[in-house]
Image (cartoon, grey):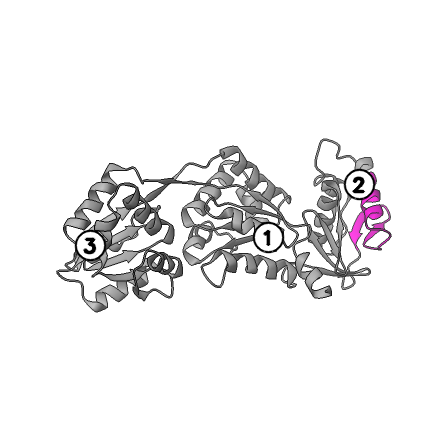
Amino acid sequence: MTTARALDSALAGCTIIVAADRRSVDLATALERRGAVVHRAPALSIVTNSDDAELLARTERVIASPPDIVIVTTGVGFRGWMDAAHENGLDGQLDRALQGAHFVARGPKAHGAIQQAGFTADWVAESETSAEVGEYLLASGVAGKRILVQHHGAGADGLDELLTDAGAEVLSITVYRWGPPPDPDVVRRSALQAAGGEADAVLFTSAPGAASWIAFAEESGALESVRRRAESGRLLLACVGPITAAPLHTANLRTTIADRGRLGSLARTVIAHFGGGKAPSLPTDAGLVEVRSGGVLVDGAFIPLSRSAAALIEALASAGGRVLSRAELGGVLPGAERNGHAVEVAVARLREALGGNEVVHTVVKRGYRLAVTEY
């Protein structure tokens, strides 16, 4: 029972931002079960093209001239295409047109969608990248083949040009596209939370979504602070896979990538980070201290803190045992009151919340320091 309780509270005090739209509720639920507070801040929305005249025209072309090879790049896109065909009474004809095709999947999600539609995937890319799909098909030979490419919402990935240059006849289909975020103010606020210590992690499930969130952070003047917090380990920026992580690498942001390109793997990565001792911590006179946006772990026990108290102890922990003056600590307090008296009151309340734990030491005439034992 102790292990179960520890697992259920692995994310206690953590505020996690999910910068995604699709299936974000599933991801949030998995994290909330472990004690996290989750804020959804989708940086883009998915706009389906099920009623798009061009999509229907291309579907009719597929029916008239069945492909030799079908490349499925996303599960949601392929399922959306099947749904659109059904809604327009073309599902039976499309099914017959695809029966003899060689199916290629760009990863497990695409593979699952192919199976769900009643087809068989003949090959699945282990790296979940379009580059591996292209390498496989070029090695197999595509000259003279009719190839259907179902694209993801970000648009072209180079497959059309690569296969055309190799002598294939390529028809591409995009079933959904990325649209603006449902609420831009929520995205801006999430970037400021991540920059200001009010969030412990930001999670990304698509490259376009990651790029959009980074753009909002830069526009809000928060990107440099996000970069510093991520580099120090105080902010976890986690991605579902290497493709999703690319915009963060381009922005020089320290990034953690889930082992497998699944939302479940992303959730486990976050839980392992905060519940498995990977988050920054410091040995103190009261035990190991790990700071979170909603409080602090002291010797394994979580203590909830006010925003002011959490800001103070994060600053002291970041100093690693170095003395911080009242002026320095006043600079991290939220709100307008940042004078010496306000700092003394905030420190007193922090100590009261810690319940007598000797975590914060006063250094006479100089300020305060965390009671780091190795200092």
Are the residues tagged 1 and 2 within 8 Å (C-beta)? no
Q: Residue at x 23, y 39 (%)?
A: 54
Left or right: 130 with respect to 367? left
Quadrant, the N terminus: bottom right
Q: Which mark, residue 346?
A: 2
Measure how far apart labels 1 and 2 are at the Cα level: 31 Å
Residue 224 in percent (x, y) is at 54, 44
Position in image of residue 71 (x %, y %)? 27, 57
**Residue picked out by circle 3:** 97
Which image quarter is the C terminus in? Answer: bottom right
Name which of mark 2 and mark 3 comes first in the sequence: 3
What amino acid is labelled 1 in the image? Answer: Leu
Residue at the spot x=75%, y=44% of the render? Answer: 309
17 drawn magenta: no
Name the spot of residue 246 as percent of width and height, x first. Answer: 42, 53
Cα distance in 3D space between marks 2 and 3: 70 Å
Segment colored magenta: 344-370
Instruction: Bin the neighbour count of mark 1 within 10 Å (Cα to Cα): few under 14, some 14-19, many 20 and up.
Output: many
Q: Which mark is residue 230?
A: none
Q: Which mark is residue 31?
A: 1
Q: Position of residue 62 (x, y in %)?
A: 19, 50
Q: Is residue 197 above or below residue 104?
A: above
